[in-house]
Image (cartoon, coloured by chain):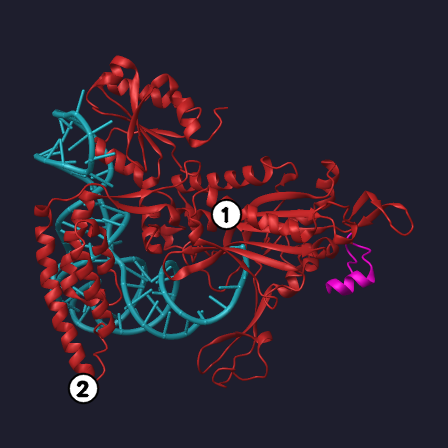
Chain colours: A red, B cyan
Amino acid sequence: MVAPDMEKIVSLSKRRGFIFQSSEVYGGIGSTWDYGPLGVELKNNVKRAWWRSVVYDREDMEGLDAAILMNRLVWRYSGHEATFSDPLVDCKQCKKRFRSDHIQGKTCPECTGELTEPRSFNLMFQTYVGPVQDDSGLAYLRPETAQGIFVNFMNVQQTMRRKLPFGVAQIGKSFRNEITPGNFTFRTREFEQMEIEYYCKPPKYLQSGEKDDVQLHQEWIDQRFSWYVRLGIDPSRLQKRQQETAELAHYAKATTDIEYLFPGSLGWSELEGIANRQDYDLSAHSKDIAEADLERLKLSKNTDSVQKLDYFDEQYTDPETNKKGVRYVPYVIEPSAGADRATLAFLCEAYNEELVSEPKESDLTQLRETCAAAAKNLEKKVAEAEKQRAKGADLKAEGPSLEQLKSISDALANAVAGLPQTLLAFEDVCNMQGAERLDVLKKVRPIAAKLCDEFTRVVLKLHPQLAPIKVAVFPLKKNEPRIVEVAKKIRQDLQPFLRVVYDDTAGIGKLYRRQDEIGTPFCLTVDFQSLDDSTVTVRDRDTMQQERVAIAELATHLCKKIGLSIF
RNA sequence: GCGGGUGUAACUCAAUGGUAGAGUGUCAGCUUCCCAAGCUGAAAGUUGUGGGUUCGAUCCCCAUCACCCGCUCCA
C-alpha cells in the first residue's frame, strides 16, 4: 500500500521531522515549507541520486550551479517577461476565472456574466539589485534554472572541450508567484528544480549512425522514467504522458511528462517534463541569428547579446561544396524535474501501514461490540433516509447523504468481517465522507486506534539510498554497561561510512518501530551473545527478519546492502 | 482571488457561555535477553491571531492568517 491521503504524509512529516510549515511561530506563510532534520537528508539523497544518475553515471554530462539573480535581459529574451504572465479576468456573476487571452469577447463564456478588468499576474518575483529601488536595478528571482544553463552554453562547452551531444545538469531553487499553490509541497512558490539541457545536433548535420533529437528525446524519457522505478516507485503509479500538439509551447517539438499517482485528490500529477526544445533557447540568447530562423522560431532579433551561442562542427562536410566544418545552433532536449515533487512522491510511495502481529479474538471484543452497535444505528439511518427519499423530500442538509451512509455502512461491515487483518481499515471508515457527522463512529475510532497502536506499524519503505538514516544501533539492555559500551562503539565506527544513530531510550520493540516510521533500513542490536562472539543482529526494516553479522564486517556488509561504496 | 470545511498539548481527538481534559508521544528513574511490555514521577496549552457582544468567551459575532476540499497551473 501507499499513503491513503496526503494528510497522513503531512502529519508524519511534521511529527517525525521531515517537513514543517514555514514561519510557524508567526502563523505561517502561504504554501512555504521547511525541511527538517530528516527531510533535508531525504531531499539531499534524492538530489544526490539524481546527480549520480545523470552526471556521474554518464560520460556526456557536466554540472553547473548558476546564480539565482541574472541580468534582466535574460528574462526578456527568454520570453518570460512578456509571456510568463497570465492576464486574468473573473466573472462577476459565476465567479469563474479565465485567462483573458483564452476567451473571445467581453462576457463570461459560461454564463455570459460581466467580467472584471484583466489583471496581469506576472509569475516572476521581482527584486531590486543595489541601493536604488528603481527600474535600473530591477531583477527577477529566476522562475526556472534552465536559463542559467543556456547562457553558460559557451563557457561549459569550451572549458570542458565538449563535442555534441553533451548535456549540463543543474539543481537549484526557483521562484514563481503561483496564483494557486497548494497540495503540501507539490506546488509552492519557492521550489527546487533538477534540470538538464542536453545539447545535440540538428537533424541536418547528423553523421551516419548518429542519433537524432527525436531518438535522444525518447532515450531521456525512458532513462528518467526508470530512475524513479529504480528508486522504488511502482511502475503502476508512474506514467508517461505525451502532451497534445495544442498543449505544446510553440518552441517545443514534443513534450512528455512523467506523472505520479499521488494519494488523495491530487491524483496523477507531473513530476517531470521532458521537452524537445530544438534550437529555440540558444537562438533566443544569440546575436546574429538569420532572419529565416528568427521567423521560424517566432523570435525577435536579439540586439543585446554579445555572443552567438553556436557550435563549430569540424566533422561535418557539406555534401554540395565539400567544405569541411560548419557553425550552427544546437538543438536541446530538456528533462526538467522537481526535486520537491520527487521527494514527495518517494515519501508517498514509501508510506505503509501494516499488521505486525495478530490480535487475539479476546482483544477484539470491544471493537466488535462497538461496531455492531454502530452498524445497527447506521441501518436505521439508511432506512430513514430511504423513506425520506421515497417521499421525494431531500435529505436534511446537515446529515450525510443516503449514498454516503450506505457506503460507510458497507465499508464498516467489510472491515468487521475481515478482522483481524482489516484492523487498519477502521480508521479509513471513520475518515470517509460524511463520517465526521456520525456520532456512532466517533466511538469506534479510539478503540480501533488503540488496537492499531499495539498491533500495527507505520513503515516508510524508502529505498536504502534515499533513507535519511541508514542504520540505528540499540543495546538490548540499557542497564548493562558492557552492552551499551559495545553499541556506542559500533555507532562511532560506522559514522564515517553511513548515517547512523544510537538510541536506548525505550524497549527494543519501540526502538524498532521508531526507526520503521522514518524508513531506517537496518537496525543493529547488541545483546549478550555480542559480548561473547562479537556479532550483532541486523534487522531488516521490510521483512523484520534478523541475521547475525560480525561487528568487524558491519561496514562492508551494510554498504553492500545499501549499494554505496565504502569509500 | 471566489465558494465549502477546519484551526484546542508535539500528534490524534474530547469538553463547556463561568478561563480545559484523554490517549499516544516526549523526558527522568527503575525494570526488561528482540518487535509500540510494565511500574513511578515530570514537563507541556493566554483553545491560530486581532477585535466585538457579554458581568464573564475556547464556545456567539466580525475580521485576519494558515491548512484541507472544489475553480486555475505544468517542476
Residue at the limit of the structure toward the right, as seen here: A321
Residue highlighted by disc 1: A339
Q: On the picture, is A252 further left or further right than B52?
A: right
Residue highlighted by disc 2: A391
Q: On the picture, is A62 further left or further right than A318?
A: left
Disc 2 secondary structure class: loop
| A152 or A393, nearer to the observer | A393
| B71 or A114, nearer to the observer | B71
Q: Which residues are magenta?
A: A287-305
For the residues beneath circles 1 and 2, the answer to whether they share a chain is yes
Q: Earlier in the sequence, mark 1 or mark 2?
A: 1
Q: Identify the residue at horizontal 20%, vertical 67% (top origin).
A: A437
Disc 1 secondary structure class: helix
Residue at the limit of the structure toward the top, as seen here: A532
The chain carrying label 2 is: A
Expressed as whole percent of the image width and height from the top left, the position of residue A105 reads 59, 84
Residue A142, relative to residue A61: is it above or below?
Answer: below
Expressed as whole percent of the image width and height from the top left, the position of residue A169 reads 61, 43
Q: Identify the residue at horizontal 58%, vertical 36% (top origin).
A: A57
Residue A409, relative to residue A218: is it above or below?
Answer: below
Q: Is residue A484 visible?
A: yes
Q: On the picture, is B3 further left or further right than A172?
A: left
Single out the mark in the foreground, 1 or 2.
2
Residue A29 numbered tag: none
The three-letter code of the residue at mark 1 reads: Ala
Residue B62, relative to residue B23: is it above or below?
Answer: below
A290 falls in the magenta region: yes
A245 falls in the magenta region: no
Within 10 Å of the Cα at label 1, are there few (<14), some (14-19), or many (20+) other Cα atoms? many
Q: Identify the residue at horizontal 62%, vertical 57% (top origin).
A: A133
Expressed as whole percent of the image width and height from the top left, the position of residue A205 reads 79, 50
